[in-house]
Structure formats: C-alpha cells, structure tokens
Amino acid sequence: MNRNLPELLSPAGSFEALKAAIDGGADAIYMGGASFNARINAKNFGEDEMSEAIRLAHSYGVKLYQTVNTMVYDREMSDLLHAAESSARAGIDAFIVSDIGAAELLRSYLPEIPLHASTQMSIHNTLGAHELEKRGFERVVPARELSHEDILSLVRGTSLEVEIFIHGALCVSHSGQCLFSSLVGGRSGNRGLCAQPCRLPYACEGQRVGERYPMSLKDLSLAEHIREIIDSGVASLKIEGRMKSPEYVRGVTSVWRELLDGGRDASRADMQRLADFFSRGGFTDSYYKRAIGRGMLGVRSEEDKQASREVEKFNKITRKTPIDMSVYLAEGEPIRLTLKKGATSVTVTGDIAQKAINAPLGEDSLRKNLSKLGDTPFTLGKLECEIRGECILPMSAINSLRRDGAERLISAITDKKELVVGKKEFKKCQSSPKNRQVGRFFTSDQITDTAEDFFDVITLPLEKYALGNTKSNGFVMPVVVFDSEEKKTAELLTNAAKYDPEYAIISNLGQISLVRKYLPSVKMIADFRFNIGNSQSAAFFEEMGFESYVASAELTMPQLRDLEGAKAAIVYGRVPLMTLEKCVIKELYGDKRACEICAENRAEMKDRRGFIFPIIRESEHRNIVLNSLPTCMSDRQDELVRAKITDRHFLFYTESAKEVDSVIEAHKRSIALDGKVRRI
C-alpha cells in the first residue's frame, strides 16, 4: 500500500468551524469569503477574518483554500479581483474556482496563486482535465458521481492533482448542472443560494405528495474504502460541510484522520461514530461502487437529529505539533534558545546567566520550563542542551525567552512572501451575435415542415442524430460522458460524421477535443450548461474556437445586455433543471412501469403546489428534469432586440408536432402563448 497519504481537506463556514477543523487533524481547510462562494449563507469570512484565519491555520501547518466557486457577472469582476488580491496578500494557498472567465482573470492577475477547478465546473472525465491543464490549473475536483474505476482513469490520465469528495451531503444533480432552486425558487445554487428543492417530497399521477422523497439522497461516505482510496493516488480527500456545526467538522475530520493514519477501512463502529455527527438514515457509496439504486435515498429522522444533539461540544483547539529546541547556557553569556519546526527555525537570546551558588540549572529543569507551551500550536519534541559551568537564571527569564521564541516561530512559519501581481487582462470578444433561429428537438417526429422552414439550425441529441436524419443539420452532445463512456460516444460521433453535420452544441469542456477529433470542421456552439454569465467566459470560448455561445439560463435581461460576443439565449422551452445519475422515474413509478413510461416520454413528477415537472431520459439511464413552465419570449421580442439577442434557441423536449408549430406561429406573429410561461 502507498504510504504517501492524501491530504485531508475539511470545511469551515465560520471561525469556530475553522478551529474545529484544525483540532480534528485537517491537512487543509476550504472556506469562503464574504462573496463569490457557493455557500453564501454560511457565516464565511470578511477580509480581516480571512487574514486572521490564514495566520492561525498556517501556524498549525494547515493550508487554507478559498472558494470562488460561483458564476460571476460582468459588473462583479473588478470586485472579485479586489477580494482575491486581499486574500492573496494574506497568504491564501489556492483559489477553488468554477467560472472559467474568472479563472482566466485570476491566472493573469495573481499568477502565483494555484487554481483548483471546483466540482461546480462539472469536470467528469480525463479530457476535461486536459483542458484545465492547458489553462494553468493545478488541481481538479471532479463530479461526485464518478465510480472508483473512473477516478482511477482520471488520476492516471492527468498531470493535475485530483481531489474527491469522501464524506458529506450529496446533490442528486450533477454539480453545476442544477437550476432547480434558481428557476423555480429564485435562489441560485450557482450563486451560493440553493434552497435544496431536491430534499422535498414529490409524486406522480394520482399519488399524494408528501409520502415519498424520490430525490433526497443519503450523505456520502467512502470511509469503508480507505485503503483502496489511498492506493488510487488521489491527492486530496474532501469533507463536505461548510453549513455544518463545528462539532460536525471536528468529529468527522478526527475520525477520518484516525482512519487515514491507521491505513484502515472503517469498521461498523467507525461508521456509527460518523453517523452520530450527521446522517440521513445512514450513508451511501453507490456512485463510487457503480451500484446505483433505491438504497441511496434517505431523509433525516428524529433519531438522527437526537444523535447529533448529543455530540460533545467543541470548545477550543487542543491540537499540538512537535517542535525541537536547543538551548545554550554559559556563565556570563546571554542564554540562547533555538526553536525549529521542519525547515523553519528561529533563535532568541535572553538574560545573562550568573554563576550558581547552589542548585544550578540542569537539563531536567530547563525541559520542565521550556515544555510549558500553553495555548501555542506547539509541544516540545526533542531538546538539546549545551550547559557550560554551573549557571542560574530566574525562571521568569526562561519563561519570557520561551514565549518570545514561540511567537517568533509562529511569525516565521506564517510569514508571507512578496505577492506577484500581474495585469488585469480583461479580454474583448471579437465576434458579434448571429441572426438566426436554432431549433433543438428531442425526437425527429417533432421536426415539422414548418420547423424546417423556420429554423436555420436544427439539432437532435447525438445518439438520435447518429441514426441519420436529413431534417437536422447538427446535434447536441450529451451532458455527461464519463471515461468509461468515451468509447461509445466516439462510435456515435463516427456515425454522426457520415451525415456531415454543420453544427455541434457542446455541453462540457471534456467534449471539445473529442468532437474535434471526429468532426474537425464542425461549428461548435457552447451550451447554456457552461453557465456563461460574463464576457470573460464568452471570450474564452471564442478563443477556443466556438462560433457562438448560449448564455446561462439564469441571467436577467439587463445581464444579457451586458454580455459581449456571439451570444445566444433560450427564448422558448422547458429549461433542464437537473441532470441525475439516480433514476427518479423508477422511484416515482416503480420498477415495472418506469421503463415503459420513460420510453414513451411520459414521465413527470408533481410538487406540493401541484406543478408538474416532465422527466426525460438521456443516454442509457440519466434523467433530465425539466422546468414545469416553458420559458417564452414570443410577445417580448422587442426586449430581445434591445439586448442584442438575435441568435435564439428553442428547446422542444415534450412538445407534439402540433405544439411545435403553435410555438413557431406565436414567434412569427410576436404574440403570447396560451397558458403560464416563464420570462427571462
């Protein structure tokens, strides 16, 4: 077994939680600033607190990473750079970033601060990691849905450090691909305000809402796979929980510290200890084992809550790190003390030693006093004493020397090197918006004669386009392509190439080189799934060879106006809210009926208010949950023109051919559709 242990990375949503993580034995801690982080409702850290937190963590030899993992708007970029520079000057060890435009700016402005790709960036394969390598990232946090085999493939296939989640709450949707809280509740998960609609009850058909929670997953725990994880070569193990209590942080961190240091898998007793800190009816490792099923679901019971209430309260940091000391004591000379931790050492001098009349100082008495390190991060390790003659000094002088030495050692350990600041390289887009209508269809039966006449671009999902369809001139890539699915996707692209597609709508960084390999001349469109919310991200995709991009479906009309480049927007359709590896259709309809309902494209779920959310199947097993209301701007086209949205995408998932024609007619005549709709 590889004895080079991976980093243990713990969360901190408050200063007390930071102390708890240190006490639990974390090697590194991740935390958010006052803005631009995906847990904006945690207490988080202002500039002064951030600086204090960094100094405290570094004094214990613990690294500190700052989350900058939200979609950033154009008008926020300068504020983001100011906040990042403040943290960099305080000594932050890395930024965890999800917005590619923000990452590009940070890389040019603060070139020496490492960049880690947040799981919100939706990287789930080796090809995606390769794109990050080219952009100067040092670490990638891939999707939590990866199996052990896919993690191994990623570790072996990239030069980046790989960080995986090993404990804590699981989003049922792929991270960065959930718009449920945003589009339905007005609280964006991509902006740190997720309201967790996945934890609510849902039903289908005649069922009563309130009895079942088909999307509420148990918390993740991979504690029973410690040895395998160590051997896998992953660089960092991440505990989720920036909204959790200090008791949770200290408790979970300490159990994982114990298991890692012991190089052993968790026992039943260990798993119960972890469950006592927080549980939703136990834990799941189903994604890791690729054993996805009903056992993954869980809700928090009264027993779970009571166990958490009984956890011992966290009071203060008791963790100590050993330091070595050497002392020189000679009559008529100042006492000299050297303190050393790793490669860092300091030397301090004190009072002049006098000749002892009786009871001269010896090694035992010096050890007794020098080991009184109190509330410092240190404990005395090895002590070397060089004593010449019989000397005496007041104990108060030795105590003062020890305190001075400890303070100077902390200062030396936490000393910040001079920060290199580059230029604020705000890139300008060179392209202009296209003037076209883009129809994106789920099935070929939806492509009517009217649609063929109306749309300039007509696409189908890749697996359907690859079957051959003369009505479409492009395809949409699947949202997710794990390494284990790359071969099948390559076969589909090979088949697609036979029909000479003009357009490919790309959903993920990991698809760019794959599509180019099989279709080098295809025109690439960056999908809304990239969460493009600023012109720096737009410039990135333009630089990567994309001929246009679809802006984030979360943007308001003023934010769309701010965007530069060849922008497009969704002007009609039920926007996908979630991408699920766990089949929610089976949970709603049961195993016997689920496949039939799914094949007929009739699956749906109902919330407590009676809203109906259609569910479609992508690829072999993934579920895509669609919005209950279609976005529609047919009667507000003057607003689109003012925002320079002349490249317009229409999403048709569940519409009949007749409904497709009705939508087209409404847009031709600039009139409203019947029924409720969502506006941009």
Image (cartoon, rainbow, N blue to C red):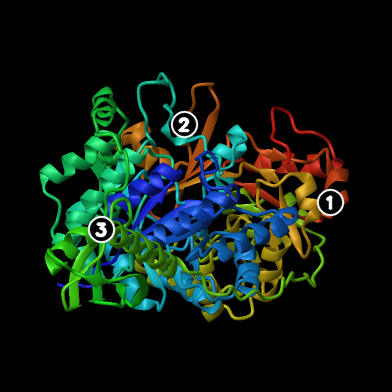
Note whether residue 296 is visible: yes
Mark 3 neighbour density, 10 Å: few (under 14) some (14–19) many (20 or more): few
Q: Viewer-proximal residue, 194 or 636?
A: 194
Image quadrant for the N terminus? bottom left
**Left/right of residue 251 with respect to residue 499 in the rendered view:** left
Circle 2 or circle 3, nearest the eye: 3
Find numbered disc 3 in the image and state the secondary structure of the residue it sits on. Answer: helix
Tag 1–tag 3 contact (CB < 8 Å):
no
Which residue lies at the image location 61% right of the left edge and 38% below the top edge? 183
Pointer 2 residue = 605
Q: Is residue 278 above or below residue 202?
A: below
**Left/right of residue 290 with respect to residue 203 in the rendered view:** left
Pointer 1 residue = 643
**Left/right of residue 53 with respect to residue 374 in the rendered view:** right
Tag 2–tag 3 contact (CB < 8 Å):
no
The amino acid at mark 3 is Met
